[in-house]
């Protein structure tokens, strides 16, 4: 669908996390940015798989931010590097919000993912 990754740098990908099922569903842009096939992403990917993609030095920070969003309703906004299957890496910025039911139980999260590699490389 999207063959030119440079085009994706200007696009926003979207995700939905079904917390009860522990599966994250991605649209075509987000699946490409996160280095999943669209077929895999449309079936749902366990959230642990996303954390495992994150560069080791950032995994604890990202996991804490996910936990805070789940427990306190904090807005999720994180930048981190992920390793790519073909080698190399990509910087991503992921934002989102957790939806709680009337009893305060987190039931789903929705948000965006963007490639911020070009900006990060310019700042380094």
Image (spheres, helix red, strand yellow):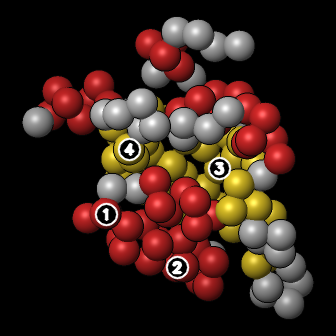
* N-term-proximal mark, 4 vs 1: 1
User: Could one spot residue 108 in this view of the protein?
Assistant: no
Mark number displayed over residue 56: 1
- Element carrying mark 2: helix
Occupied quadrant, residue 12: top right
Nearest-to-viewer mark from 4 and 3:
4
Nearest-to-viewer mark from 1 and 2:
1
From mark 2 to mark 3, how far is it between C-alphas?
15 Å
- Element carrying mark 3: strand
* N-term-proximal mark, 4 vs 3: 4
Query: Left of 102 or right of it: where is 120?
Result: left
> Where in the figure is residue 60, as x and y percent of width and height?
36, 74
Quadrant of the drawing holding the C terminus:
top left
Quadrant of the drawing holding the N terminus:
top right
Q: Do the residues under discs 4 and 3 have CB atoms within 8 angstroms? A: no
Q: Which residue is mark 3?
A: 111
From mark 4 to mark 3, how far is it between C-alphas?
21 Å
User: Could one spot residue 70 in this view of the protein?
Assistant: yes
Q: Which residue is mark 2?
A: 68
The answer to whether residue 54 is above or below residue 99 is above
Q: Nearer the viewer, residue 124 or 54?
A: 54
* Mark 2 nearby-residue class (10 Å; few <14, some 14–19, many ≥20): some
Nearest-to-viewer mark from 3 and 1:
1
Query: Left of 104 or right of it: where is 10?
Result: left
Occupied quadrant, residue 96: bottom right
**Which residue in the rendered view is the most extreme toward the front?**
86
> Where in the figure is residue 68, as x and y percent of width and height?
52, 79
From mark 3 to mark 1, how far is it between C-alphas?
23 Å
């Amino acid at each position: 669908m999207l063959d030119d990754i440079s085009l994706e740098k200007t696009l926003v990908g979207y995700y939905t996390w079904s917390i009860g099922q522990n599966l994250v569903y991605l649209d075509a842009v987000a699946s490409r940015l996160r280095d999943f096939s669209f077929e895999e992403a449309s079936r749902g990917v366990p959230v642990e798989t996303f954390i495992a993609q994150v560069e080791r030095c950032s995994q604890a920070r990202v996991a804490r931010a996910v936990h805070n969003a789940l427990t306190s309703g904090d807005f999720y906004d994180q930048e981190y590097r992920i390793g790519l299957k073909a080698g190399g890496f990509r910087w991503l910025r992921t934002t989102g919000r957790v939806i709680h039911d009337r009893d305060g139980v987190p039931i789903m999260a929705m948000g965006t993912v963007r490639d911020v590699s070009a900006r990060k490389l310019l700042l380094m």
